[in-house]
Image: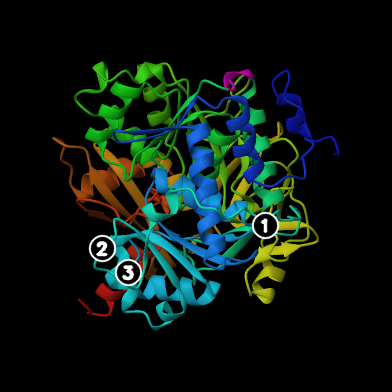
């Protein structure tokens, strides 16, 4: 790989490039079950499963699916929370050369219908609670359905527990081409338009697991680590950072079905996790919980922060009170997901997304054409290249051609790179506010507002203005026990930032809209603002 400025900041032992083995995802489960059969693989409530048991149950499930007519390449919708069943179903599909279609169990009928139809799924493995919504979808008639917790009287579906018993069927030998065969269809969040299925091959995901593991260096021991898996597996971040990396490293996966701070505190106290991939809202909730001092947070060696920018003050406070190291980074569904991270040792730059992970190239290009590389300090579109970058969008050749150009993935995020090769996200192309001819990046203003002692959470966006085109508005959640008026906060901002960046309007809310993984849904606030202006609602 061409020498880049960030290579000088890789800690000792971390290579600038990696060799990616051409193996399937399932090979990692086979290896960990062989090397450490009695190690606990999954903790799910009161249930535990060793790696030997996990492999056995996965192969039982795969054999049953094969008996029912499963073929290589079949798309299988997984609609499950973090659980033993999710891990088994995921790896059973991989064992047969199928494609996992990741779906959020909380999706409503229209969202479910779109993904099922778009992916042309043949199988559905889900929790029984989604059955009512599924049955309202016409496409569901084409699905072979398997539910967890299915009542005996339900006749049009299989019970997942039926898949976990031995069968006389021998599993077939499946030939997988890791670089070509798709392992996962990861649908993008849809915050900037209609969801698209990113085709992630075995090679993409295996490469990113090696990249993740390499950045940890000697901190991640194989075996022995315990991964607090709160980030949902159906999201690319939870899938590869929590589940797949754990299986690769023979670590224990501690399942949590959705983030609830009291339960998270209990799990930390009971199981003493060593790694915690999370998002800023989770760290904020844990830090301010009254039981935090005696929760045992000091067992956590490393925290990954992704999916949303990490306020610098929150990072510093969390590290001071826990002793953990927060590795702030960046990724996206189309890159399996990790592309950048701050080094775990050596120079970290809080507030940045760090440097490209081994085997990854990255640069900043002009917003107009995307063809010209910009100088350090100039804001432009972040593009990346590496073995973790998707094959393309499922059945979307035109959109694939826009996102993938000459081997580079165009992320749609606006960033800068400093002289050392550290990158900072300053906004998205479609979120940039243009006020009176000035380009304003919401993240920059949010970072400033987080410094005010009354501000707990903030989301900045542009609202129409006849004179300036757009002006800045901030939606604010205040810390408990604090109060401040709109005028007071705007006055404070006026003393902290350039005039054209100062919010013209401030709205105080009880909570901000977010995705299930804690990413702020700026688009929802923008749409709500449009309705107010049009007198709707």
Callout 3: SS: loop
State the count of labels: 3
Q: Distance between the residues labelled 1 and 2?
A: 41 Å
Mark 3 surroundings within 10 Å by alpha-carbon count, few (fewer than 14), some (14 through 19), many (20 or more) = few
Q: Where is residue 41 in the image (x, y as percent from the top left)?
A: 47, 32
Q: Position of residue 295 (x, y in %)?
A: 27, 20
In the depicted view, which residue is nearer to us: 389 or 69?
Answer: 69
Query: Does the residue at mark 1 contact the one at mark 2 (Cβ under 8 Å)?
Result: no
- Which labelled disc corresponds to residue 308? none
Q: Is 255 drawn above or below residue 289 in the view shown?
A: below
Q: Where is residue 291 in the image (x, y as percent from the top left)?
A: 21, 23
Where's the N terminus, which quadrant?
Answer: top right
Q: Which of marks 3 and 2 is in front?
A: 2
Q: Give the range drawn in magenta.
A: 218-222
- Which labelled disc corresponds to residue 108? 3
Instruction: Name the colouring of the figure.
Output: rainbow
- Which labelled disc corresponds to residue 390? 1
Q: Where is residue 164 in the image (x, y as percent from the top left)?
A: 43, 49
């Amino acid at each position: 790989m061409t020498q880049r400025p960030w290579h000088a900041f890789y800690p000792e032992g971390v290579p600038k490039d990696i060799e990616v083995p051409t193996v399937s995802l399932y090979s990692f489960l086979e290896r960990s079950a062989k090397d450490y059969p009695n190690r606990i693989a999954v903790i799910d409530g009161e249930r535990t499963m060793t790696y030997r048991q996990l492999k056995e149950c996965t192969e039982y499930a795969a054999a049953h699916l094969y008996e029912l007519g499963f073929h290589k390449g079949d798309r299988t919708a997984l609609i499950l929370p973090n659980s033993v069943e999710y891990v088994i179903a995921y790896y059973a599909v991989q064992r047969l050369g199928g494609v996992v279609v990741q779906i959020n169990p909380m999706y409503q009928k229209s969202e479910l219908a779109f993904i099922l139809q778009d992916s042309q799924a043949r199988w559905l493995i889900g929790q029984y609670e989604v059955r009512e919504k599924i049955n309202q979808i016409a496409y569901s008639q084409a699905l072979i359905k398997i539910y967890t917790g299915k009542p005996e009287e339900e006749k049009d579906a299989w019970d997942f527990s039926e898949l976990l018993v031995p069968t006389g069927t021998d599993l077939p030998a499946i030939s997988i081409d890791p670089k070509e065969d798709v392992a996962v269809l990861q649908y993008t969040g849809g915050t900037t338009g209609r969801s698209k299925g990113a085709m992630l091959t075995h090679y993409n995901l295996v490469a990113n697991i090696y990249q993740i593991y390499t950045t940890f260096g000697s901190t991640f021991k194989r075996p022995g680590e315990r991964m607090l898996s709160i980030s949902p597996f159906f999201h690319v971040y939870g899938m590869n950072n929590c589940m797949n990396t754990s299986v690769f490293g023979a670590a224990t996966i501690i399942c949590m079905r959705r983030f609830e701070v009291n339960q998270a505190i209990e799990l930390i106290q009971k199981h003493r996790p060593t790694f915690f991939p999370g998002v800023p809202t989770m760290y904020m909730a844990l830090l301010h919980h009254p039981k935090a001092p005696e929760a045992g947070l000091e067992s956590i060696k490393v925290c990954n922060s992704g999916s949303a920018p990490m306020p610098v003050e929150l990072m510093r406070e969390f590290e001071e009170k826990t002793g953990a190291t927060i590795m702030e980074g960046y990724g996206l569904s189309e890159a399996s997901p990790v592309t950048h991270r701050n080094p775990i040792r050596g120079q970290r730059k809080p507030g940045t997304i760090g440097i490209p992970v081994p085997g990854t190239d990255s640069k900043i290009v002009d917003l107009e054409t995307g063809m010209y590389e910009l100088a350090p300090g100039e804001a432009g579109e972040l593009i990346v290249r590496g073995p973790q970058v998707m094959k393309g969008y499922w059945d979307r050749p035109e959109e694939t051609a826009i996102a993938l150009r000459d081997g580079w993935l165009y992320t749609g995020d606006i960033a800068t790179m400093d002289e050392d090769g550290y990158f900072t996200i300053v906004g998205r192309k479609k979120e940039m506010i243009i006020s009176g001819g000035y380009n304003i990046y919401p993240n920059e203003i949010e970072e400033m507002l987080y410094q005010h002692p009354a501000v707990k959470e903030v989301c900045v966006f542009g609202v129409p203005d006849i004179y300036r085109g757009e002006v800045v508005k901030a939606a604010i959640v205040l810390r408990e026990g604090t109060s401040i008026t709109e005028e007071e906060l705007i006055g404070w901002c006026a003393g902290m930032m350039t005039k054209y960046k100062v919010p013209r309007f401030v709205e105080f809310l009880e909570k901000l809209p977010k995705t299930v993984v804690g990413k702020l849904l700026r688009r929802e606030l923008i749409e709500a603002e449009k309705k107010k202006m049009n007198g709707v609602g």
